Image (spheres, rainbow, N blue to C red):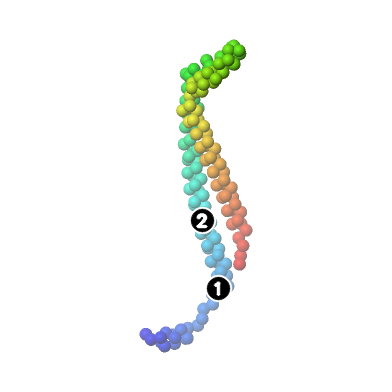
Amino acid sequence: MRQDDVDRLFSKLKPLNPPGNLVNQIVTRIEDETYRSLMRHLRLKMALMISGVVFVCPLFFWAIYWLIDDLRTSGIWYFLSMLGMDFGATLANLNDLLLAILESLPIASLVMVLASALLIFVLIDKTLSSLSQRKNLQFGRKLNLKF
């Protein structure tokens, strides 16, 4: 086919006018797809965070049990009871007493409790921020501005 044949073919065709609401349909379809992909992402994010909270909660309670057990078996209670016995002797040897108290603290179980508590708070904060982000997306979708 030559260029003249193509030009003649297109000159015989009637021009098609796009529908009047084509731009609105395209924009609505793009908004719908964007909303769906964001909602899928938020659902996955929330599911992972909730499962993280479900996993970490038993770890937190186990760490508390471990801390209580370690505090019960450590000698920290003997050193703390010395604070109330002889106040003059306690003040005279305060540095040694504080060092003995710090050495008898169950640091590993204390760190485990604090770390799991921090992880729970971070996961709950992220989950709540995802919920607020989801509500903001739904509110923005209700506005549905047309061009």
Look at the numbered disc 2 and give the secondary structure of its residue.
helix
Q: Residue at x 49, y 30 (%)?
A: 111
Q: Residue at x 50, y 83 (%)?
A: 14
| Residue 73 placement (x, y as % from top left) | 47, 18
Residue 65 visible to an observer of this rendering: no
Look at the numbered disc 1 and give the secondary structure of its residue.
loop
- Of 145 and 56, the residue lying toward us: 56
Q: Quadrant of residue 92?
A: top right
| Residue 82 placement (x, y as % from top left) | 56, 14
Q: How would you rate the neighbour count of disc 1 (Cα within 10 Å): few for under 14, some for 14-19, many for 20 or more?
A: few
Q: Which residue is mark 1?
A: 19
Label placed on residue 36: 2
* Quadrant (top left, top right, bottom left, bottom right) of the N terminus: bottom left
Sequence-wise, the earlier of marks 1 and 2 is 1
Count of marks overlaid on the render = 2
Q: Nearer the viewer, mark 1 or mark 2?
A: 2
- Of 72 and 5, the residue lying toward us: 72
